[in-house]
Image (cartoon, grey):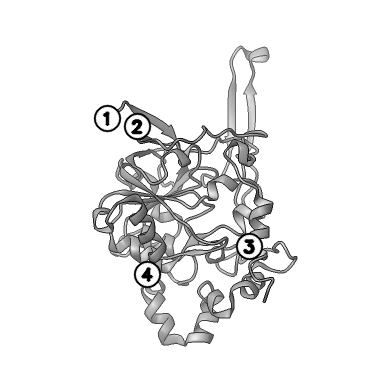
Amino acid sequence: MGNKVFVDLSHPFSAECPRWPYFDKPEVTSAHTMAKSGVLTQWINVPQHTGTHCDAPRHVMEYEFDGRRARYTHEMPIDAYTGNAVCLKIEVEPWGLIGPSDLEAGCAKAGIDPGELAGMVLVLDTGMHKYYDDSKAYYHYACGTGVEAGRWFVKHKVKCVAMDGQALDHPLHTAMGLNGGTRLNLLGHTGQPLTEEYTQLFGKEAFAEFDKFEYIKLHGQAAYDAKYGDLEENSGWGTWEPCHKLMLGNGIVGVENLGGDLAKVSGKRFRFFCFPMRWYMGDGSIARCICEIDEDDLNDVPTRDYFYAGTGYADGAHGGANGGEYIKRLFGRNKSK
């Protein structure tokens, strides 16, 4: 056994860090400076779901599945986001919907039986942390989870899911598609709305997984009720962030935008530490995420460097990845059809 070491699994925070498409830009100002006041004091105005952060149940629902009012950040156990962990390497195509088979394949690669996951923090390395940037590659076209993955997490009684993408749910399960109060249906790489791009690439049946009304139209109300009925009963609108709701409604908290040196611990077991602010009536919190691992267990990869104002983007030589190549890979998949 080697020495225990700490590995940072957080992206750097700054006023320039990437943010969700409808979030305001973080504002960082200096009320006092060394030259003016002899001290440096900075003021920050930012949504708490910026950069590496964690969610509380109240973020996405009014009531949890046991009927209680959804808990705020200060009401969660102090170790809700902390504990024994395993990092699964998840391999899906660009814009892929992560399901139980992908999670079980990740377990097999990490040498852990899903039956061992009860009470553990499950860390997902999808590779998206390498694309962390103000970009379509990271936000529009990220892979993500949905209702089936959410049920899998509940079935195996994990305590927390920490993911390296823009959100736990697939982008089209969020307001970037046709879900939620804002229903942005953002314009994609081709100039068409994301929903149309996805349908062209993957077909109507695949897209219906992300849209309540298309699902009912294609499969019928009974099929929708069988798949999303419990979500509709507890939190409404089943295709709107279903994994968030299934997790948080069952007391499983989530961490999003994991990054840093995640590649050093991918496929490994370790202790995961994440503590939100003790924010009264908070819906989540920016957080510092780290892991404690045996030095001999670390993967032999370079320490990640971050560039331009700490936004997270870096080229392949520095631990990042090329978002343009990612998009080419996505849109090149069906050119022969």
Reading the image, the residue beneath label 1 is: 1
Label 1 vs label 4, nearer the camera:
1
Above or below, 126 relative to 295: below
For label 3, the SS is: helix
Label 3 vs label 4, nearer the camera:
3
Reading the image, the residue beneath label 4 is: 234
Residue at 71 percent across and 61 percent down: it is: 189
Amino acid carrying mark 1 in the image: Met
For label 4, the SS is: helix
Question: Mark 4 and mark 2: span between their CA atoms?
Answer: 46 Å
Could you tell me if the residues under marks 4 and 2 are in contact, i.e. CB atoms within 8 Å?
A: no
N-terminal of the pair, mark 1 or mark 4, is 1
Nearest the viewer among 124 and 325 is 325
Could you tell me if the residues under marks 3 and 2 are in contact, i.e. CB atoms within 8 Å?
A: no
Label 3 vs label 2, nearer the camera:
2
Could you tell me if the residues under marks 1 and 2 are in contact, i.e. CB atoms within 8 Å?
A: yes
Tag of residue 83: none
Amino acid carrying mark 4 in the image: Asn
N-terminal of the pair, mark 3 or mark 2, is 2
Reading the image, the residue beneath label 3 is: 330
Question: Mark 3 and mark 4: span between their CA atoms?
Answer: 35 Å
N-terminal of the pair, mark 4 or mark 2, is 4
Task: Please say whether residue 61 is visible from this viewpoint.
Answer: no
Reading the image, the residue beneath label 2 is: 296
Q: How many marks?
A: 4
Question: Mark 3 and mark 2: span between their CA atoms?
Answer: 37 Å
Question: Mark 1 and mark 4: span between their CA atoms?
Answer: 47 Å
Residue at 75 percent across and 65 percent down: it is: 191
* Mark 4, other Cα within 10 Å: few <14 / some 14–19 / many ≥20: some
